[in-house]
Amino acid sequence: MGKTLIYIVLLGILGFGVYYFLFREGDVFGTNEAGFTIKDTASVSRIFLADKKNNTILLERKDNGWVLNGKYPAMQTPVNTLLHAFLMQEPSYPVPESMHNSVIKLLAADGIKVEVYDANNKSIRTFYVGGQANDGLGTYMLIDGAQRPYVVHIPGFNGYLTPRYSTDIADWRDRTVTNVPRTELKEVKLAYDAEPLNSFTLQQQDTGHINVILDSMLMKGKELNKRRASVYTKFFEDLHHEGYINGSYKLDSVIAAAPKMCAIDITTTNGQQQHIDIYWMSLNKRSKNMLTPNPNTPQAYDADRFYAVINNAKDTVIIQRSSFDKILRRGYEFYQPDEIIPEKLHSKEGEAGVFHK
């Protein structure tokens, strides 16, 4: 009986110690020390990211979408990816004592501070994001004011989470080049530098009547292909670029040396204007036509990508030919007959093929 009582007392002391360690001293897996998960992402209205190089990202939820740094539309995909991280990320284990100091130093030197707020600007969470854990399956993180850093992961995701907390503005900015619905398109001027005879102006009246103006000799005796002109007005909605290259090494010199392919001027029904300059890109390691020439591209230039200067000449981006070929038409094409089979005239395939190569 005496021994049994001793065992009960010892078990009680052990249980209390476990409880104290897990739930009292440091709250090891509680919100204070390891609360990296934010379940109510719908309440998140403001996210601030900052690194040690003074790069900062401010994402704010507005009625018409997320806004970046108070002036740019934010790209929805990375915002959704970050919110998904908030929802799913959870601590795997505390950083071992043997690595504690080194991880703290890494966070102090290269960590990204993350501040999350609700619609009332009340802080939801503040924590620091470091690099990849030694096992390659987690990310070092530290709750602001906590004693211990943790390895944090998303269950089922094999990788680390730092890229989701990027402080590079190019990773967050919306990549729209132009987004004009056909009903709001008033005029398009497309001028080819090396092929002025192929330049044209398309004008759409309020009544829906469309006129395409080009060199009079190319129009003489020919009838406008109204279907082509009508389909063309659809191509200026949701056109996106591949990525920003602002700040790239010697970018001004690269653009200055690149021949201009064309310039596009777009006017909407409410008077907004947009100017786009498109330049040839020299052959590079990514150029598929380096080994297989493309008959539609001069030999010295990339067949799949162009440089484009947009947003009142403030941004230089890369655009893909696969996205822009549909608007880079020649004026005479609007005065040619269709060459697609009748049953495809009203299909998406028919619209894509209304201009034959």
Image (cartoon, grey):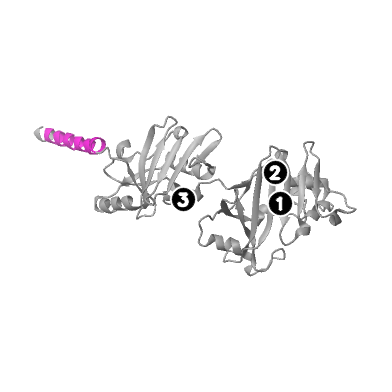
Name the residue at 18% across, 36% down: 11
* Residue neighbourhood size for the residue with mark 2, other residues' Cα within 10 Å, grouped as few (<14), some (14–19), many (≥20): some
Q: Earlier in the sequence, mark 2 or mark 1?
A: 2
> Relative to residue 217, is residue 280 drawn left or right?
left
The amino acid sitting under disc 1 is Ile
Name the residue at 26% across, 35% down: 23
Query: Outermost residue toward the right?
Result: 221
Whether 175 is drawn above or below 29: the answer is below
Q: Which residues are magenta?
A: 5-25
Could you tell me if the residues under marks 3 and 2 are in contact, i.e. CB atoms within 8 Å? no
Q: Nearer the viewer, residue 54 or 179?
A: 54
Q: Which mark is residue 267?
A: 2
From the top left corner, tell me how far across and down residue 339 is, in percent: 82, 53
Q: Which mark is residue 336?
A: none
Q: Which residue is mark 3?
A: 168
Query: Outermost residue toward the top?
Result: 120
> Relative to residue 272, is residue 92 drawn left or right?
left
Q: Which residue is mark 1?
A: 327
Q: Is residue 18 magenta?
A: yes
Q: Nearer the viewer, residue 352 or 257?
A: 257
Q: Secondary structure at mark 2?
A: strand
Is any atom of residue 344 visible in this view?
A: no
Q: Secondary structure at mark 1?
A: loop
Q: Is residue 11 magenta?
A: yes
Is any atom of residue 335 visible in this view?
A: yes
From the top left corner, tell me how far across and down residue 38 is, in percent: 41, 37
- Magenta highlight: main SS: helix
Q: Earlier in the sequence, mark 3 or mark 2?
A: 3
Q: Secondary structure at mark 3?
A: loop
